[in-house]
Amino acid sequence: SDWAAGLSLPSGATAFFNITATHDGIGVRPVADILPPAQIDALVQGTLERGGQVSSRTLPDGGKAPYELNITFFDALLPPGADPAAPESLDRYIAAQAVALSLAGVPAIYFHNLFGTRNDAAGFAGTGRARTLNRRRFERAELDALLADGNGRERRIFDRYTALLRLWRTQPAFHPAAPQRVLAVDPAVFAVLRGEGTAEAVLALHNLSASPCRVTLPKDLAAGPWTDLPTGDRFADGAAIELPPYRLLWLRRPWPV
């Protein structure tokens, strides 16, 4: 939250490009000056424990440093041994993807992120190239079958993700250039107010932890009622908003302009 609160564009003719993963994997270089070395080391170790690989770059002194994590975004978030189809696993993944949608800028969504593709271990074994892990190639019939299963993991992710995207498109507050204020409400919660000062402003709350959180909003946002756009759930005020593990809320209220 501290890092996001300090973001600013160099000019009004530019926009942020919000990426969680690409066909190469998950980039590490952008966080080299943001995360301490111990946290980057933890990301590397976590990737290896989850069946991923880590590509390195050569430093001027001849040493090596992580360049990218070769792992799908879904597997990067999945604790070793956890059930990938469990509701908590899907909630964790969707909450993380929703952060990228809620931030100022243009979200860039990798194809495989739409349905939470797992690591292509068989493909990696065949090519020996680390990037193959995040580049599974589907036959059309195979992908159609996965998405036809209404109870399947891939279809459940696809439905939730695309529902968020459809909602995102309808909200002027999520325009790439709409104002953004990051709030410090709880260490486990990423909170951002988009479109402040307009009647369409949205307060996005994302509990990124496995524990429930109680959020108290700043005084200028405490008055309700609040309505969660994805679910229609209502909150009388912002004095004590309960967030279950990995819950996201995109809240609207009658805003004075």
Image: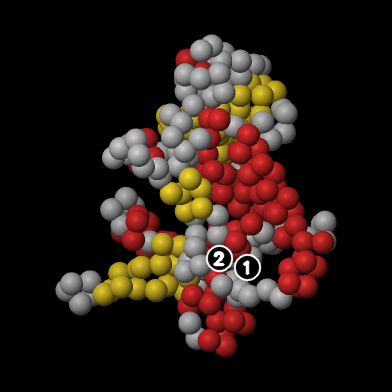
- Mark 2 Cα within 10 Å, few/some/many (few <14, many 20+)? many
- Measured as percent of width and height from the top left, residue 13 is found at 35, 39
- Residue 118's disc is 1
56 lies above or below 9: below
Which secondary structure lies at badge 2? loop
Seen from the viewer's position, the closer of residues 209 and 221 is: 221
The residue wearing badge 2 is: 72
Seen from the viewer's position, the closer of residues 243 and 234 is: 234
Residue under the point 61% across and 74% down: 136
The amino acid at mark 1 is: Arg
- Measured as percent of width and height from the top left, residue 92 is found at 61, 50
Seen from the viewer's position, the closer of residues 168 and 212 is: 168
Which secondary structure lies at badge 1? loop
Residue under the point 18% across and 72% down: 60
Total marks drawn? 2
Q: Are marks 2 and 1 in contact (CB under 8 Å)?
A: yes
The amino acid at mark 2 is: Thr
